Amino acid sequence: MTFNYRLPVNIIFGCGTAAQAGAVTRPYGTKALIVTGTSSAKRSGLYEKVRGSLEEAGVNSLLFDRVTQNPLTTTAMEGAEAAKASGCDVVVAIGGGSIMDCAKAIAFLAVTDGDINDYIFDRKTSDKALPLVLIPTTCGTGSEGNGIAVLTNPETGDKKSLRGEAVIAKASIVDPECMMTMPPKVLAAVGFDAFCHCMEAYTARKAQPITDAMALYAMELIAEVLPELYRGSRDVEKWEKLSVASTIGGMVISQAGVTLAHGMEHPVSGLRDVVHGQGLAALTPVIVEASWRGDEEKFARISRILGGETAADCTRRVRALLEEIDLNVTLSRLGITEGDVAWMAENCMKVSAGPVANNPVTFTQDEIAEIYRKAL
Amino acid sequence: MTFNYRLPVNIIFGCGTAAQAGAVTRPYGTKALIVTGTSSAKRSGLYEKVRGSLEEAGVNSLLFDRVTQNPLTTTAMEGAEAAKASGCDVVVAIGGGSIMDCAKAIAFLAVTDGDINDYIFDRKTSDKALPLVLIPTTCGTGSEGNGIAVLTNPETGDKKSLRGEAVIAKASIVDPECMMTMPPKVLAAVGFDAFCHCMEAYTARKAQPITDAMALYAMELIAEVLPELYRGSRDVEKWEKLSVASTIGGMVISQAGVTLAHGMEHPVSGLRDVVHGQGLAALTPVIVEASWRGDEEKFARISRILGGETAADCTRRVRALLEEIDLNVTLSRLGITEGDVAWMAENCMKVSAGPVANNPVTFTQDEIAEIYRKAL
């Protein structure tokens, strides 16, 4: 066993901590680009709260609110231009994974010349970015716990991650109260994404004891609270559990990586702008069924966390969890057709070589195409 | 629940990784002060291996080999003088907790003016130190996983920690092969220290989910392998498990803190130069018995890890673990007398206010004196 564990996150966790945004940001700059989506952070009042807190701490801000689901490399470039033009020295994100990931890329591009695709495909490297403060409003992506930013190139459809310590947030403010405004349908998708992060990191070839410990614990938390929260529970302690589990999910994939479900989902949402968590829900049971023999001990442990017993039982248990949160979807229902399979399988080998190799069972392009077909 | 998780460690783990010392150190400097104890790193050949690896990577070195068990503030000052006089720009430690802790203080003092005791007692602060590379040779202290350096002031007997991100190693090379030369008696003491780190962090008032996850996992590993390793097993996989568990123990106390056993042990070894793990072994069962009602759920979980069932059973289970590794000692057998109790109880309130407050049950000075008496 050899591994490297290196993850300089700074997680500030707790109900009400969003109000500390100003004090947390101030050590890193005096002019913030606040990155949000087109509406929800404003509707919920969180944007105003954070903006006010920054102002009180002596941090001016400029709003960049053009980030959409499955954020585009081109949007990140626009944001970086805005940051540069107005002399922003820190980037504050308020939102879900798309927004945090785009904010990371904006912070990176604001001090890095050239084409972001070169950095995404490792043709160039840089270890610089504006300091980042992230305030997640969904508990799923875990982007607040790592140096990963997934972006889609609108020209090629390539959905792939920019990675590096430069885009690990100087501080992430994880305030469970900010999550409680999520609609149930969003919660189901992001909650399952968090579960997948933990399950994939735990069964990854690059898994290591420290991430195993965290992933197991977080899967237990998610299995315990997600269905109840989906049914509308306002129990703060349960929201805290899901929030911390989601952050842990982000942390573990940063060290152990994701595996095939994430690897195969990126072509799906890169091609058809599918909701990431729904794409995962369509693919994961089929992939678990094809992969559990690659690590029976670990899949058995996941199965037990979900109320099952054996590795062979794991697929059924994952489906049962999906049923409980009304997320038992197929790729067809998400708008994917048989005609998309060949492109997705080929694109998966291109953008997800790492995750494909990190899966406990390694599949060829043809086998991956077959998995897509089974998930239709 | 509110917490901050911030721990920028960089753990390079695996058999044979000590040979990477040069490559790992080179980014941080070109002249290293190598800190060791008086003999064992030289006897085992590890010192020569590391020195050679540094040289090959273009890092000159100077040896400082005067560190003893329960390292003294005065030794750290000597080491810092040596580092300054010879222009060292990086500190490399090879050894157990005493050596790593002393190396941390040396790195700190090499760039910090004034009396180290002011920093230990929080009368002054500084966030600077020379970069540190730590190579542990015992699996117990976990010093490689945190920014804590425990030192003893020979004038006052105060044994207390210097803390801060400045003394978190830039890289820690955890090579299980370096542990395998430990004599069984040393292994028992350091292995139990590691278990206490996890147990204390897990039951601490400052416990948080991320450290709970790691502490539980590491306790399982230690309970699984420590007795067998003590009996002489050379199974590399088991040594790996203990080594990683020990590093995790260091990580979790850095965020959640230690509690009463560590808090009460420091006066013991500060006064009589007792082996830390033996002092813990004498105190821990008495403290668990006095504390388990403070968190029945968590002590029950520890009990189950040790083969028991309930929180009430935890003390007996801890004693059973100690029996298995021939560490069921008393303070009397370690040279402590009834006449020492009053000083130790008073000193505990002075040097261990944090750990005392972090225990699931809070005890007065008189009650702490009574616990010392029960452990005699």
Image (cartoon, coloured by chain):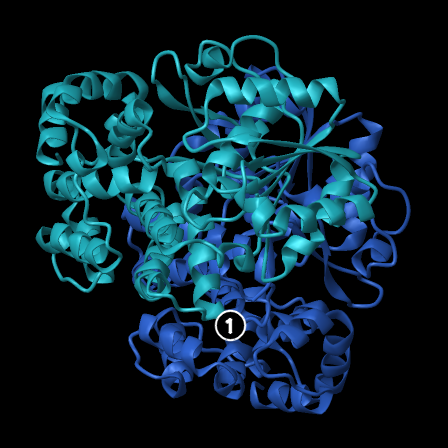
Chain colours: A blue, B cyan
Residue name at image x 68 percent, y 23 percent: B83
What is the chain letter for disc 1? Answer: A
Q: Does residue A129 appear anywhere in the picture?
A: no
Q: Nearer the viewer, residue A161 or A164?
A: A164
Residue name at image x 67 percent, y 59 percent: A70
Q: Nearer the viewer, residue A295 or A148?
A: A295
Quick one: SS at disc 1? helix
Q: Quadrant of residue A48?
A: top right
Residue B28's spot in the image, x, y percent? 74, 36
Q: Nearer the viewer, residue B74 or A233?
A: B74
Q: Quadrant of residue A236?
A: top left
In the image, residue A367 above or below residue B123: below
In the image, residue B44 above or below residue B143: below
Residue B310's spot in the image, x, y percent? 11, 57
Circle 1 crowding by C-alpha within 10 Å: few under 14, some 14–19, many from 20: many
Q: Nearer the viewer, residue A284 or B142?
A: B142
Residue picked out by circle 1: A203
Residue A71's spot in the image, x, y percent? 70, 54
Q: Is residue B366 left or right of residue A269?
A: left
Q: Is residue A366 left or right of residue A12?
A: right
Residue name at image x 73 percent, y 64 percent: A159
Callout 1, which amino acid?
Answer: Thr
Residue name at image x 78 percent, y 74 percent: A350
Q: For the C terminus of chain A, which image quadrant?
A: bottom right
Farthest residue to the right: give it.
A114
Q: For the N terminus of chain A, which image quadrant?
A: bottom right
Q: Does residue B349 appear anywhere in the picture?
A: yes
Total marks placed: 1
Q: Is residue B54 left or right of residue B191?
A: right
Residue B121's spot in the image, x, y percent? 41, 14
